[in-house]
Image: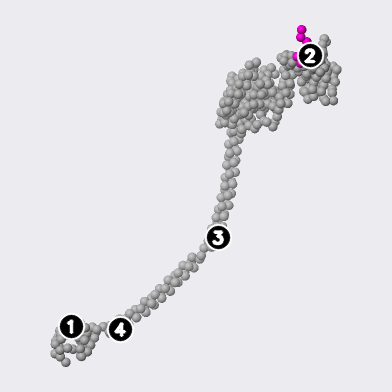
Amino acid sequence: MVFYTVNQVATYLRESFESDILLSDLYVSGEISNLRRSASGHAYFTLKDDTALLNCVMFRGQQGSDVLEDGVSVSTHGRISFYEPRGSTDFIVDLVMAEGAGALSLEFDRLRSQLELEGLFDESRKRSLPPFPKVIGVVTSSSGAVLHDITTVVTRRYPLANILVSPTLVQGDAAPENIVQALNDLNVDGRSDVIVIARGGGSLEELWAFNDEMVARSIYGSKIPVVSAIGHETDFTISDYVADLRAPTPSAAAEMIVPDIIDLKKNVLELWSHINNIMESHFEGYQTGIEIINRDLIRGLPDLEFFRRAIDDLNRESDNSFQHIINMLSVLIDSVDKQLATLNPKATLDRGFVVVQNQQDSVVHSSMSIQKGEIYSLIFADGSARVQSAGK
C-alpha cells in the first residue's frame, strides 16, 4: 500500500486537468450566479444549469468581463484547473459572450484577444507596401474567380508587374496547412515584392481557414509584406488583423498594391513640363548673365579704332621721317661721291699726270729716289710704259 501526500494528489489533479485536450480548450454555456469582483479586478462566479454548476474565475483584462451579471445566460471559453491551496476545481474563463453566440464566434474572439495581447496586431510592426512592385505573389485558389479579378486589375492598372501564384485550398480542414505552405513557398522563393492572401466571400464557416492560428502566425512571420483580402468588405478575419494591410475585396487589394499607369503617365508629363519650365528659366537667367558679361567685356576692351588711327599716324610720320633720312643720305652720298671722284688717282692721271713706280711697284715720290740704270714704270691715264733711268 502506497500513501501519497495531499500535495502530490493536488499536483496530479492539476497536471491531469491541464494535459487533458478537452478540459484545456473548453466551451461552456450556462447562467451566471454568485458574481463577485475583487479589488484587483478579477471576477469570481458560478456557471450553472438545471443540474450542476462550475466555480469560475475570470482574471482582469479578459474579453467580455463587462457581460458578467447575475442571472445572465452566457457562452464562455476557458480551461479547467485545480487550485491546490483551496482544493477547488475552477473553470478559468478567458472569454465571455452573451448567450446565442456560436462556438466559432467564441473561438474567433478568444484567438483575437490572445494574439492582440502578444502584439501580432500592433500597427508599429506593419510595413509599407512598395510603390512599384515588380512581382506580386498571390496566395489563393488557382481555379476561383479571385485570381482572375486580381490579374485583370493589375494588368489594366500596371502591366509592368508580374503575378506569381502560389495555389492553395481556401476552405476546409486542410486549408490552413495549405495556406501556410503557400505563403512559406513565396517567402522561400523571394522574388515577390508583396504578397496578397485572397478569397471570395462566404459564411463564417467558409472563411474559417483564415481565422486559424497557424495562418495568423505565418502571416506575422512573413519576410515579405502581406495584404489580406478575404471575403467582402463586411467580413473580418484574424488574417486581416495580422496582415500589413487589409483590403475590403480581392479587386480592391489589386488596386491598392499597384499604381495606375494612366496617373503615372500624367505625373511624368507634369514633371517633365515642370522640369522644362525650370530649365527655360535657368537658361533665360544664364542668357541674361552672358549678355551682361559680354557688355562688361566690351567696356573693358581698348578702343581699337583709336589705336588703328594712332598706328596710321605713326606710319605716316615714320614714312616722312624715313624719306627725310633717305634724302639726307642721298645728298651726303652725292657729296662723298664727288669728293671721292676728286681724290681718285685716275682723275689726276686724266689731267696729264704720270705715276712713277720702281721695280718693287712702289710709287716714287721724289726725284732723289731715281737711280741710274734702274727700270721704272710710268703709269699714264691710258696705259703704262717701262723706261731705264739715265741718271740724275
Mark before the other along the chain sequence, 4 or 1: 4
Mark 2 to mark 3 CA distance (whole Å): 111 Å
Judge from the rendering whether residue 284 lies leftward or rightward of residue 389; answer left or right: right
Q: Which residue is mark 2?
A: 5
Q: Amino acid at mark 3?
A: Asp
On residue 359, which mark appears?
1
Classify the position of the N terminus by image quarter: top right
Q: Which is closer to the viewer, label 3 or label 4?
A: 4
Q: Residue at x 67, y 20 (%)?
A: 212
Q: Can residue 64 be seen in this snapshot?
A: yes
Between 20 and 257, the one lying in front of the other is 20
Q: Amino acid at mark 4?
A: Gln
How crowded pointer 4 is (Cα within 10 Å; few <14, some 14-19, many 20+) is rated as few
Q: Is residue 198 above or below residue 1?
A: below
Give the prevailing secondary structure in the magenta stretch: helix
The reply to whether the magenta stretch includes residue 10 is: yes
Q: Which is closer to the viewer, label 1 or label 2?
A: 2
Mark 4 to mark 2 CA distance (whole Å): 167 Å
Q: Which residues are magenta?
A: 1-13
On residue 296, which mark appears?
3
Say which quarter of the image contains residue 199.
top right
Extreme bottom residue here?
Answer: 392
Q: Amino acid at mark 1?
A: Gln
Q: Residue at x 46, y 67 (%)?
A: 308
Judge from the rendering whether residue 383 lies leftward or rightward of residue 311; answer left or right: left
How crowded pointer 3 is (Cα within 10 Å; few <14, some 14-19, many 20+) is rated as few
On residue 221, which mark appears?
none
Q: Is residue 119 above or below residue 11?
A: below
